[in-house]
Structure formats: structure tokens, C-alpha cells
Amino acid sequence: MNFSLPPEVTVQSQVLNDGKIYQFHHPTLGLLGRIVLQDNPDGLCHISSEVAGDPNDPMTETRAQIFEPLSQQLCAAVEAALGKGRQTGAGKPNTGISPTAPKERIASQQIPCPKCGEIAALLIFANQAKEIAEMEDCARKTYSIYEELDVVTWIIGATVGTLKGDPIAPILRVWPQRHAIKYGSPKMFDAELNAILPRHCGGRLP
Ligand SMILES: [Zn+2]
Ligand SMILES: [Zn+2]
């Protein structure tokens, strides 16, 4: 097949009983999407491509901007190589038509508003995430949770080092607005959280 990927994009393939899955990863965006080749009983090979992520997630569009040109090229290359087959659903958001990863348990903590007691913040613990891409993968997988809960949400990654004796982890604020990833200690994070919690009821804490 005559096809070359941009240098920053990596691809992993997985063989299925009736086909093959190619997963595309980006160093800072994480999983971009996948292309699934399936042999069907009608003798044709079906090609489908799926951008990773919730269609409502604005990051899905960011991923699509990189993934779609690749997927179109690769689908064309595969079709040319096979001389048959059909492209279906190119670029559509992932609808889980083929084997998906088993559901992971992701730890999270809901923080109540100190004044009214309603849930005011959500912390999601990406306990394995050290790389930016892994943080983004977690943000993608948990999108529907924080969109639904609709409170200020942070994703907190694994400890990557220490600063003045305090453990430092990547922290990504994803809702209601996305912020850039930063690295901080639990102390620094608590200070940020405690500055934001009082906004829930609009006033200052006593
Ligand atoms: Zn068919
Ligand atoms: Zn409140």
C-alpha cells in the first residue's frame, strides 16, 4: 500500500476474527480514531472509519481535523490494494460498531459546595496517566460523565515527580471550559479548588 503517515501519528493494528483494526494515536491528543476492515459474508471487505470521542465533545472535531484526511487516504489506499470493498461511514464519530475496549473503572470524586451541599466539582483520577496523550484519552473517555454532571471538572493524572518534596501530577481542567494541562501538587490543586468552590453559590465563604 502506498501510504505514509505524518511523523507524529502512530498506528497500532489489531487482528480480529473477521478483519483488522487500525488505531491512530497522536502524541498530545491521544487516540484520534480507528479504521476497521471487516470481511463480510457477501465477500466484500468493508472499511469503516471512526473518529474517537463523543460527538458533543469539541475535542472530537480537533481529532477529526487530523484523522479525517488520514482516514480518507488510507481508505483509498486499501480500496486500491483490494480492488474491491466499500467505504462506509467515513469520519463519523465512533458509534461502537465493532469490538471496543472493555469498560474501564475510572475513579472519581464529587465535591459538594461547602455552602449548599450540592455537587459543585468533579475530580477524575487518571491513575495511570503521565503523558499528555493519556490525559487526553481520559478526557475523551469520560466526556459524557462531566458533560452530564455539568460542574467544574479536573482530570488528575499520576505522579510524575516531586517539587520541594511534594508529588507533582498533570492536571487538566476540562469543564465547563478547557484549560491547558499543567503540573501541580495536591497542595496547589487544593488551593485552586478552594478558590473555585465558593463560586457555586456565588458568594464568599464565611
Ligand atoms: Zn456488504
Ligand atoms: Zn452551592
Image (spheres, rainbow, N blue to C red):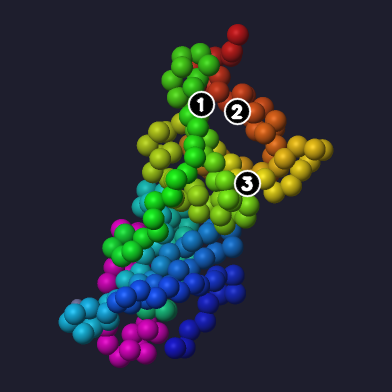
Separation of disc 2 and disc 3 at Cα?
18 Å
Location of mark 1 (residue): 111
Which kind of residue does numbered mark 2 sit on?
A: Leu
Q: Along the horizontal axis of the image, is 8 left or right of 187?
A: left
Which amino acid type is marked by label 1? Ile
Q: Earlier in the sequence, mark 2 or mark 3?
A: 3
Secondary element under disc 2, as helix, strand or loop, is helix
Residue 110 locus on image (x, y percent): 48, 29
Query: Where is the C terminus found, in terms of image quarters?
Result: top right
Q: What separation in Å lies between label 3 and label 1 (alpha carbons)?
A: 20 Å
User: Is residue 114 highlighted in magenta?
Assistant: no
Disc 1 secondary structure class: strand
Q: Amino acid at mark 3?
A: Ala
Distance in Å between CA atoms under marks 2 and 1: 9 Å
Residue span colored magenta: 76-95
Q: Is residue 118 left or right of residue 39?
A: right
Badge 1 local density, few (<14 within 10 Å), some, or many (20+)?
Answer: some
Judging depth in this view, the residue of 160 and 26 nearest the camera is: 160
Q: Nearer the viewer, mark 3 or mark 1?
A: 3
Q: Position of residue 132 (x, y in %)?
A: 60, 54
Can residue 182 be seen by looking at this rendering?
no
Tag 2–tag 1 contact (CB < 8 Å)? yes
Q: Is residue 173 above or below residue 57?
A: above
Q: Which residue is mark 3?
A: 158
